[in-house]
Amino acid sequence: MGYASKSPWVIHYDASSCNGCDIEVLAALCPGYDVERFGIINTGNPKHADIFLVTGSVNERNISVVKQIYDQMVEPKVVVACGICACTGGIFHDCYNVIGGVDKAIPVDVYAPGCAVRPEAIIDAVVQAIGILDEKSKALQAAKKGA
Amino acid sequence: MLFVTENFIFTLIGTVAFAILAPVVGCLLAGLDRIISARMQGRVGPPLLQPYYDVRKLIAKDDVTVSGVDGVYMTCALVFTAFAGGIFFSGGNLLMSAFVITMAALFFIMAAYSSRSPFAELGAGREAVQVMSYEPMVLLMAVCFFMAAGSFNVGETFWLKLPVICYTIPAFIGFLFILTIKLRKSPFDLSTSHHAHQELVRGTTTEMSGKTLAKVEVMHWCETVLFLGWTGMFFIWGNPVSIVLAIVAALAAWFFEIWIDNNFARVKWQAMLKWAWIVALVCGGINIVLLAFI
Amino acid sequence: MELISFLILFPLVIAVLLLFVKADWPRNVIVGMSAAVIAVASIALSVRYIGAPWIGFEFSSEVADYIGTTIGVVIAATVIGFGVKYKNYFAVVLAAIQVVGSLVFEFGFAHSVHVPVGLYIDSLSIVMALIIGVIGSGICVYALGYMMDFQKHLDDHGEEEGLTELQRRDRRPTFFALMFVFLSAMYVIVFSNNMTWMFTGWEVTTVCSFLLIAYTRTEEAIRNAFRQIIMNIAGGIGFLVALFLAVILANTLSFERFVLIGLEHPEIVSVAVCALAFAGLTKSAQMPFHTWLLGAMVAPTPTSALLHSSTMVKAGVFLLIKLAPLFMVCTVPASMVVLVGGFTFMLCSFMAISQSNAKRVLAYSTIANLGLIVACAGVGSPEAIWAATLLVIFHAAAKSLLFLCVGTAEHHIGSRDIEDMDLLFDRMPRLARFMMLGIMCMFIAPFGMLIAKWATLVSFVEAGQLILILLLAFGSGATFMFWAKWLGKLSGIAGSPENVELTVHPSEWISLVIMACIAVVACIALPIVSNAFVEPYIVSVFGVLGRDVTIDNLWISSILAVFVFVVLFGGVRSSKKKRVSAYLSGVSVDDATRTYRNSLSGESVATSRNLYLDSYFGEDKMRPIGEALCGAIIVVALLASGLVVPPIL
C-alpha cells in the first residue's frame, strides 16, 4: 500500500444529472457512513483532491468546468464516473445539448453505472480508484526519480 | 558585553529538538483530535496516524504552484515556528517566542496572499484580522506572566514557590479564549476550516497543494504543541511533579478547545474582533491591575 | 569641535551655492559630492567620538547670538510675508508674538546669562548626527532623480492639469537649498548646549519645512503648510517660554546646567520642562498636532521622507529624550508626555488600518512610532531610554527606505494607493524587495524595531505604567494588521514580468540601496549597535546601564534577521515549478487577469480589496477622540504646572 491510498481526498462535481446520483454520492460521504475511517475527506477544492467523483452527463455548458476542475487537480489523480449518465450520457444521451459521458471531456478511470448509482457501486468504484491512485502515485515517484 | 551566554546555545539546541519532536507529538495530537471530534459526532473516526498519512501523501504529490513563491514563504513560516518552539521549550524568553510565532503567522499570510486568488486573499485578510484580534491578549498574558514570575524567562518557573496560575487566573481565562483563535478552531476558523465547504473554499490554503500544503499541516502541529506548552507553563513551579500537572492541564485545555470546536458555529470577524479585544481588555486589564497593586 | 562646526557650516555654504545653480548636471554633481562629504564627516565624527560620554566644547560668541537673533527675525518676516500674501492672519499673529518675544528675550534677558560651553557631543548626538548625515543626505541624493521626474511631469502635463504658471515654475534651486539648510539646522539642534542656539535651529527647521510643504504652491499645499507653521510656531512659543523661565528661575541657558539644576530642584524647572515638552510634542506631531504631518504628505516625497524619518520629527523626540532624566522627577510634564505618547501610538495605529494611500499609512505609522518614543522618553527610566533610542535609529532607517520606495513606485506605476501595488514584485522586483524589507523592519520579529518595542513593553511594566501597557498591546495588534495586508499585496508573483523599473534614475537606486544597507546592517548588527551607540549614552546620563533585552536575545534576533534577508533577496523568486491557474470555481476564462465566466455567460473579473475596517477604525471615529483626549491632557498639564509658577516667583 502506498501513501496515496491511505488518504484519498475526494471532490464531487455534479455535471447535469437528475440529482439522484448526487444524493447517493453525498449520502455515502455523510457522517453516518463515516468514510473518514478510511482517511477519505470530501475536500471541495480541486487543488487538494485526489479522486474526482463526477455525476451526470457532460453538456455544452459544463464541459469546460469539468475540464478545468480536472486540470486543477494535482497529479496523481483519478476520475470516477458515478451513475450511468456520467458513464455514457444515460437517458439524456440524445438531448440536444448533451455531449455524452464524462469521458468525452476528461479521461475516466473507473465507471460506476446505475440509475441511480447504488452505494455498493460507489464504494466498489472508490476502492478500485484507490488502487489506481496508488499505481499512478508509484509511477509518478518513479518518473521523478528517473528525471 | 557582546558575547553570548550558554542560553543562546540552549536555544539553538532547543530549536533543533523542537523541530524534530514537535511534529511527532503534534501529529499524534492532531490524530487524536480527529478521533475525539469523530466520537463527539457519533463516528469512529480515522486511524491515529491519519494526519501522518495525509502529509506523506501530500509530499508525494506533484509539485505545482500558482504564484511560485508560496512554498518559500511556507518554509519560512515553518522555520520560524521551530524557532519559536525552540526558544520557549529551552526555557527562553516568552515574549520572544510570542513575537517569533507571529512572524510565522505573517509568512503564512504572505503565502496565502501571494497566489492572488480571491478566495485565498480573503482568507489571508481574515487571518490578519485574527492575528490582530489575539495579539493584545498574547502580549498582556506575557506581561502578567512577567509580573507574576518576575521574568519573561520560561525557565524561571522551575524555581517558583507557587505556579504562575495562582496570580493569573483572569489572564489565563483570556488566554484560553484567544487560544481558540490561535488554533483556528470554530467559532473562530474564519480564515480557513478543516474542510472546504464554505464561502471561502478553503480560505488561506485554497491555492496550496502538495508539499506546500504539507508544510501548513506540519506548522499547525508544531503550533499546537507550542501553544499547549504556553498553557502548561502556567502550572509549573519548583516541584518536579508540577510537570505532570502541567501536561494534564494542557491536555485538558486542549480537550476543551476540541469541545468548543464541535459545539459552536462560526462567528463573523466583527464579533471575533470585538470579543477578543473585550476579553483582552477585561481579563488582561484586571489581572495587570491586580498584580500591580497586590 | 572642528568637525562639528564643519557639519553645521558646510551644508549652509552648499545651500547658498545651490540657490544659484539652475542647470541639472552641476546641481547633480554638487548635491552628490556634498552629500557624500557630509556623510563621511558624520561617520568620521562618530568614529572619533564613539562611546564617548558627555563632552562639552568651550565656545561662546556674541556674533553667533546676534546671527541667531537675525535668523529669528528673518524667519518671522518670511512667515509674516506669506501670511499676508495668502491672508492667513493667525499665522501672522503667532509669528509676530514669537519675534517680539524672542527680541525681548535676546536683549532683555539673554545677555545677562553667559553660556561658556556652547557646543557638546555625546552618544545620542552621535546617533542623531549619523541619521542626519547618512540618511538625510541620502534623501538629498534621492531627490535629484525624483525632482527631475517631478519637474518633467509638471512641464509635460502641468498645463493640462490646470496648474498655473506659478505652480509649474522650476523651483528646484530653492528646494535643494532648503534641504541643505535643513540639515545644517538639525546639526545645530543636536550639538548645541546653548538653548538659544538650539531654539534658532528649531525655528529654522520649522520654516524650512513650511517652505518645502508649500513647494507646489497649490491651494492644498499652501493650506497644509500653514497648518504646519501654526502648530509649530505654537510649539516654538512654548520653547521660548521655556527659555524665559530657564533664565528667570534657573538663571541658566546651558542645557546641561538646566538638567542638573532640575535634578536637584525639580520644582524650579517643572514649568520650563512642561513648556519644552509641549514644544517637543508639537514638533513630533503628537495628537492633537498630528494633522500637520499628514498634511505634509502633499509635498514631494523626499520632503516627506526628510521631515518624517530622519530630521524634523526626530528633533522633537530628541529634545524629549534629552529631557528624560527630568521626567523622572517632574511628575506633571512626565504624565503629560507619557499619556499623549501612548494614546497617539494606539489611535494612530488604529487609523492606519483604515488608510489605503501608502503615504498616509506611512504618516500614521510614523506618528504612532513617535508616540511610542515619546512615551518611552516620558517614562524616563534607563531601560525606556534604551528602547527609545533604538526606536529612533530603526525608525529612521526603515521609514526613509519606505518613503523613498513609495515615491519611486508612485512615479512608475502612477499611484500611491496600496491597492494598486498588486504584483509590484513582478513589475518592479528590486523595488518591491526593498519595500518588503522596509515593512518587515518596521514591525516584525527579528528586526530592531520590534526588539525596541519589546524593551518598551518591559520598561513600561517595570515603571508600573499600566495604562501604557494596555495602549501598547492594542496598538501593536493594529500595527500587525496594517503592515501585514500591505506586505500581502506585494508578495505575489504572477510570472509574466513586465519590468517597469528600468527607468528609475540611478540616483534613486543609489540612495535606496544605501537605505536598505543601513536597515540590514543595523538589524544584523543589533547587539553591536546597542553596545556602541545606545548603551554609552544610557551610562553617561544615568550612570547605570538599563537594557531589558539580554544579549542572547539580541543575537537570536540578529540570526533570524539574516535568515529573512537571505530568503527575501535570495529565496523569493519565480520557481521552476509547474504553474497552474488559480481556482475560480471551475469557470475561469483568463487566469492572468482572474477573469471568470459569470452566470449570464458574460465575463467578470474577480477583484478583492484589503480589509480597511472603516466602521471601527475610520479617521472620523478616531480623530475626535484622540484630539479631545490628548488636547485635554496637554491643557490640564499646562494649567497644573502653570499654577506652580506664582509661588516660586
Image: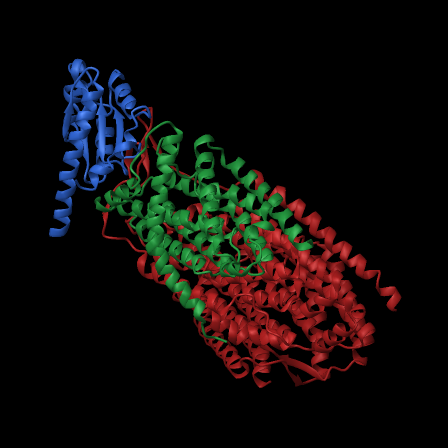
Quarter of the view holding residue C389: bottom right
Colour chain C appears in: red
The image position of residue C377, as x and y in percent, is 64, 64
The residue sitting at the left extreme is A146
The image position of residue B180, as x and y in percent, is 47, 41
Colour chain A appears in: blue
Colour chain B appears in: green
Quadrant including the N terminus of chain C: bottom right
C106 or C421: which is nearer to us?
A: C421
Residue at image position (45%, 71%) is B5
The image position of residue C440, as x and y in percent, is 45, 57
Quarter of the view holding residue A125: top left
* Rendered position, C414 above or below C203: above
Quadrant including the C terminus of chain C: bottom right
C504 or C525: which is nearer to us?
A: C525
C124 or C61: which is nearer to us?
A: C124
**Scheme by which the image is coloured:** by chain
In the rendered structure, the answer to whether residue B213 lies left or right of residue C163 reads left
Residue at image position (19%, 20%) is A83
* Rendered position, C113 above or below A116: below
B113 or B217: which is nearer to us?
A: B217
The answer to whether any part of residue C16 appears in the image is no
In the rendered structure, the answer to whether residue C352 lies left or right of residue A84 reads right
Quarter of the view holding residue C463: bottom right
Residue at image position (36%, 52%) is B22
The image position of residue C608, as x and y in percent, is 41, 39
The answer to whether any part of residue B267 appears in the image is yes
Badge count: 0
